[in-house]
Amino acid sequence: MTHIEYFKLQAKNLYKDWKNREQRLFVFDIRELFRLYGVKADEQPTLMKAQHLLAQALGRDKWSDLLHEPEERLAYTRTVLELEKFENNKSDANSEKISETEGVDESTLYHGMVECLHCGRVFPIDKPNHLPSCDGEDWDLVPLEDIETDKK
């Protein structure tokens, strides 16, 4: 499958999820996309609108911008999208598994608000809420409150 065919498939997945009013096929949180890009809840889905929304979520202004990019950039964007999908599937599969922090003294962990240096979003550290086009990692998160170093 070429990169363009892959993005066409992703746009179709978004369209199907949007039309069925469910989150099954598309990798990004559709409700978050609607909020970010001003899509009204009662707006009728079309494939063209889904293509445009996908392009915006991938950091492009419009669908044609995505289609006319060099192969290297398309390959990179596809890899990032596939990694996002893989991470989402992995987190869904591991949702009932033991927490990574089990056995760690919870009182020593930071529980406040953080800002992502990559996308600029602010959210609680335990509830990541990056922009869909953000490829920031944990080390891009900066605490907004002072961290106590001496627990009493």
Image (tube, helix red, strand yellow):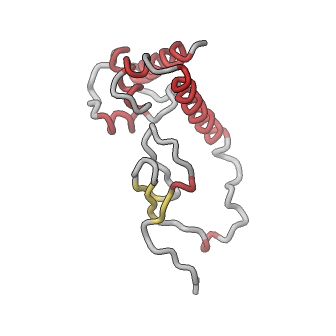
Res. 108 image quadrant = bottom right
Res. 89 image quadrant = top right
User: Quick one: 66 or 97, which is closer to the camera?
Assistant: 66
Residue 16 visible from this viewpoint:
no
Quarter of the image that includes the N terminus: top right
Q: Is residue 101 above or below residue 42?
A: below
The picture places residue 133, in percent across and down from the top left corner, at 45, 37
Please tell me which residue is depicted at 59% across the width and 29% down the height of the picture: 79
The picture places residue 12, in percent across and down from the top left corner, at 46, 16
Please tell me which residue is depicted at 58% across the width and 87% down the height of the picture: 152
The picture places residue 138, in percent across and down from the top left corner, at 57, 54
The picture places residue 38, in percent across and down from the top left corner, at 27, 34
- Outermost residue to the bottom: 152
Please tell me which residue is depicted at 66% across the width and 46% down the height of the picture: 96
Please tell me which residue is depicted at 56% across the width and 24% down the height of the picture: 72
- Outermost residue to the right: 103
Q: Is residue 86 above or below residue 91?
A: above
Q: Is residue 49 above or below residue 41?
A: above
> What is the total number of numbered labels drawn onto the structure image?
0
User: Quick one: 80 or 20, which is closer to the camera?
Assistant: 80
Residue 9 visible from this viewpoint:
yes
